[in-house]
Image (cartoon, helix red, strand yellow):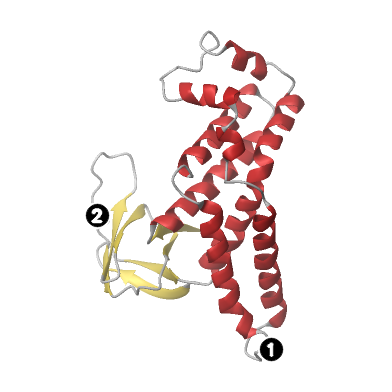
Amino acid sequence: MVIAYDFPLNEQIRTFLRLKHLFRRALYWLEQNAPQDHHGALLALFEIIDVTARADVKSDLLQCLDRQRMALAPLRGNVNVLQEPLEKTLSDLETAAYDLHASKGKFGEHLRNHEWLMGIKQRTGIPGGMCDFDLPGYHYWLSRPPEERRQQMQDWLAPLLPTYHGLKVHLALLQESGRALQLEACQGLYQQAKVGPEVRLLRVLLDNDQPCVPEISANKYLLNIRFMEAGEAMRPGVFASNLEFTLLLCSL
């Protein structure tokens, strides 16, 4: 089994990856039934609001989808390119962009204007601040039937889902189109010059039977990867052995 470690090279991709992670968490907990599960889904929703507070996610994502579509569209009719997967990818990009254009308002605006939700969110920064004696109305909501809670959360999430679907399309294409390099780290260290200004994401693929994790430092001039010993040590050491890994340079 291989583990993929992503390292975004700009703030936009960093935000996109965080949002994808939070949406997956929210949707997973939403499908469960216990009050603690739906509490977890709501916390993920609050984090989505925080991550997007200073970013125009919809506009940024539309630009990325359009850039990918423009890069792939000229490949139509190219005998060296499989046309069926290409057409599916272009269709996915066009559908994601259409749904984003159709979504109304600023991302998450309906949540930021929801007085009850924002009252609960204010308590999340206080340790233990969401106890039943602090938020009796929230305690009552958690006691409602799971189907009722789930329907409400689905209503809150629905305006955000076009963005989530667009993120999945964009990031999947970015991750899957990376140029793969088969490399070796000598005594846990690897260095490479000139990553390239067009590269937006690095991915390190490593067998999970290797007891180490990569620490990546990169800019357009230099890439450094240190493979650190996995474990619970406060200051893990550099993995002492040579090891093979795959590096993907993702730019599409």
- Residue 152 vs 128, above or below: the answer is below
The residue at 43%/54% (across/down) is: 14
In-front residue for pair 235/171: 171
Q: Earlier in the sequence, mark 2 or mark 1?
A: 1
Question: What is the number of callouts on the image?
Answer: 2
* Image height of 163 relative to 224, above or below: above
Q: Residues within 10 Å of mark 2 (few under 14, many from 20)?
A: some
Q: Position of residue 83 (x, y in %)?
A: 70, 82
Point 53% across, 65% down: residue? 64
- 161 up-or-down from 64: above or below: above
Packing grade of label 1 (10 A; few <14, some 14-19, many >=20) is few
Camera-nearest label, 2 or 1? 1
115 in relation to 202, above or below: above
Q: SS at mark 1?
A: loop
Label 2 and label 1: CA atoms lie apart by 49 Å
Asked whether the beta carbons under mark 2 and mark 1 sit within 8 Å of each other, the answer is no
Q: In this figure, which residue is indicated by the disc labeled 1?
A: 77
Q: Nearer the viewer, residue 116 or 248?
A: 116
Q: Tell whether 133 sits left or right of 181.
A: right
**Viewer can see residue 31:** no
Helix, strand or loop at mark 2 = loop
Residue 251, which numbered label?
Answer: none
Q: Amino acid at mark 1?
A: Gly
Corner quadrant of residue 239: bottom left
- The structure residue drawn at horizontal position 40% and vertical position 69%, both measured from the top left corner, is 247
Quarter location, residue 222: bottom left
Find disc 2 in the rendering and name its residue: 238
Give how far across and how far down residue 251 sits, in percent. Answer: 46, 71
User: What's under tag 2, amino acid-wise?
Assistant: Val
- Which quarter of the figure has residue 209? bottom left
Q: Residue at 71% of width from left, 69% of height from top?
A: 91
